[in-house]
């Protein structure tokens, strides 16, 4: 009887040790995943706020307010960035929920401003998959916004103009003095 009790006790201790080890591994994976998401968000924020992107945002919004909807240079630079964000969501490097919290405002507005250019680019190159991640990202953000009860995901002309004016205000002070920037 004593041998049976010792074997049972040893098996119980081993089972508890395995459960504790698995729990610790689970928590370590969660911590690493959270750390990865934070690093990814930091990278996105850094790219969004560095000088080339601020300049591109400034130019896209300035041209939008002037009624110039060309899809070249700066507009393509912003669209390519959105394409990368869409890729991150598509490969699940960052969840839709986290991306929505971090960047949906910019994604939705810039997509609406660039949509006609993206469509024209697709027609010019006979490739309806150009900027596909960007389109899917916009759709995912608007769908997620509806689930979260966001007040608006349909950005009309007045909303886009207000957004463009705001973007000009927040990008201009951080741009180096260039011809025409400080005088606008």
Image: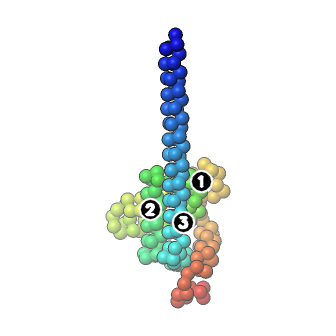
Q: Would residue 7 be visible to someone looking at this image?
A: yes
Crowd tier of the residue under label 1, counting other residues whose Cα lies within 10 Å: few below 14, some 14–19, many 20 or above: some
Q: Would residue 56 be visible to someone looking at this image?
A: no
Discs 1/2, front: 2
Discs 3/1, front: 3
Q: Nearer the viewer, residue 70 or 103?
A: 103
Q: Nearer the viewer, residue 65 or 54?
A: 54
Q: Which residue has dot 1 on it?
A: 145
Crowd tier of the residue under label 2, counting other residues whose Cα lies within 10 Å: few below 14, some 14–19, many 20 or above: some
Q: Which residue has dot 2 on it?
A: 84
How far is disc 3 from disc 2 in space, using C-alphas?
A: 13 Å
How far is disc 1 from disc 2 in space, using C-alphas?
A: 20 Å
Q: Where's residue 63, x and y in %?
A: 53, 78
Q: Residue furthest front?
A: 2
Q: Nearer the viewer, residue 139 or 30?
A: 30
How far is disc 3 from disc 1 in space, using C-alphas?
A: 20 Å
Do the numbered discs 3 and 1 sit on residues whose CB atoms are within 8 Å? no
Residue 182's place in the image compared with 96, above or below, is below
Q: Which residue has dot 3 on it?
A: 45
């Amino acid at each position: 009887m004593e041998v049976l009790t010792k074997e049972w006790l040893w098996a119980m201790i081993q089972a508890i040790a395995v459960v504790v080890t698995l729990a610790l591994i689970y928590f370590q994976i969660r911590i690493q995943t959270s750390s990865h998401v934070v690093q990814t968000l930091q990278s996105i924020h850094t790219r969004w706020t560095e000088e080339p992107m601020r300049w591109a945002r400034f130019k896209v919004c300035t041209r939008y307010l002037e009624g110039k909807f060309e899809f070249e240079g700066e507009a393509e630079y912003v669209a390519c960035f959105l394409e990368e964000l869409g890729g991150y969501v598509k490969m699940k490097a960052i969840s839709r929920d986290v991306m929505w919290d971090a960047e949906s405002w910019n994604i939705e507005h810039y997509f609406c401003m660039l949509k006609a250019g993206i469509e024209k680019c697709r027609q010019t190159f006979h490739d309806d998959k150009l900027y596909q991640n960007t389109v899917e990202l916009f759709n995912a953000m608007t769908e997620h916004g509806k689930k979260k009860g966001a007040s608006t995901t349909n950005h009309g002309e007045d909303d886009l103009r207000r957004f463009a004016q705001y973007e000009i205000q927040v990008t201009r002070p951080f741009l180096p003095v260039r011809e025409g920037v400080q005088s606008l």
